[in-house]
């Protein structure tokens, strides 16, 4: 997929997100701080990248990525759960299975 195709994908999801926000707030788009908009855009780029390579996204920023997950089907796990002692059991794959 060319770069322009990826940008179109992101733009389409951005407009879907905006339309969803309008629906939830009775036609008015809630105002977000410009820093929050930039942060969500960067998180969206991360989620799309992780989805493309079929990887697991490990983050403690679950609220933003759960919102993004509605538009980008990415696997998410909290850092606390991923790095929990005893869960890895010395497995060099760090809890990832080879079937994905």
Image: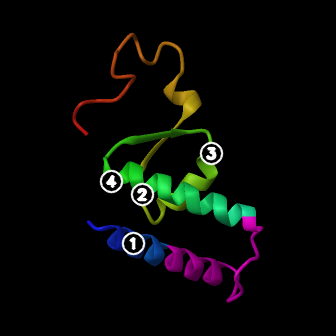
Tell me: residue 21, above or below residue 84.
below
The residue to which callout 2 is attached is: 48
Which numbered disc, 1 or 2, marks the residue that appears first in the sequence?
1
Which numbered disc, 4 or 1, marks the residue that appears first in the sequence?
1
Which numbered disc, 3 or 2, marks the residue that appears first in the sequence?
2
For mark 3, does the 10 Å Cα neighbourhood hold few (<14), some (14 to 19), or many (20 or more) residues? few
- Label annotation for residue 23: none
Question: Contact (CB < 8 A) between labels 4 and 2?
Answer: yes
Position of residue 17 measured from the top left corner of the image (x, y, whole percent): 55, 74
The residue to which callout 1 is attached is: 9
Report, in whole angstroms, how far the alpha carbon at label 3 lies from the one at label 1. Answer: 23 Å
The residue to which callout 4 is attached is: 52
The boundaries of the magenta stretch are 14-34
Tell me: residue 35, above or below residue 26.
above
Q: Nearer the viewer, residue 10 or 16?
A: 10
Location of the C terminus (image quadrant): top left
Find numbered disc 1 in the image and state the secondary structure of the residue it sits on.
Answer: helix
Question: Contact (CB < 8 A) between labels 3 and 2?
Answer: no
Question: Contact (CB < 8 A) between labels 1 and 2?
Answer: yes
Find numbered disc 2 in the image and state the secondary structure of the residue it sits on.
Answer: helix
- Left or right: 53 in relation to 50: left
The quadrant where residue 24 appears: bottom right
Q: Nearer the viewer, residue 4 or 94?
A: 4
The residue to which callout 3 is attached is: 61
The quadrant where residue 99 appears: top left
Q: Depth-wise, is mark 4 or mark 3 nearer the camera?
A: 4
Q: Residue at x 29, y 68 (%)?
A: 2
Report, in whole angstroms, how far the alpha carbon at label 4 lies from the one at label 3. Answer: 20 Å
Residue 90 falls within the magenta-colored stretch: no
Q: Residue at x 34, y 16 (%)?
A: 92
Question: Contact (CB < 8 A) between labels 4 and 1?
Answer: no
């Amino acid at each position: 997929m060319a770069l322009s195709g990826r940008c179109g994908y992101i733009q389409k999801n951005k407009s879907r997100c905006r339309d969803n926000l309008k629906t939830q707030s009775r036609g008015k788009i809630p105002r977000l701080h410009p820093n929050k908009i930039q942060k969500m855009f960067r998180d969206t780029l991360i989620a799309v990248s992780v989805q493309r390579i079929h990887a697991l996204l490990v983050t403690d920023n679950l609220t933003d990525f759960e919102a993004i997950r509605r538009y980008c089907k990415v696997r998410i796990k909290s850092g606390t759960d991923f790095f929990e002692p005893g869960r890895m059991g010395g497995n060099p794959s760090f809890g990832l299975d080879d079937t994905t």
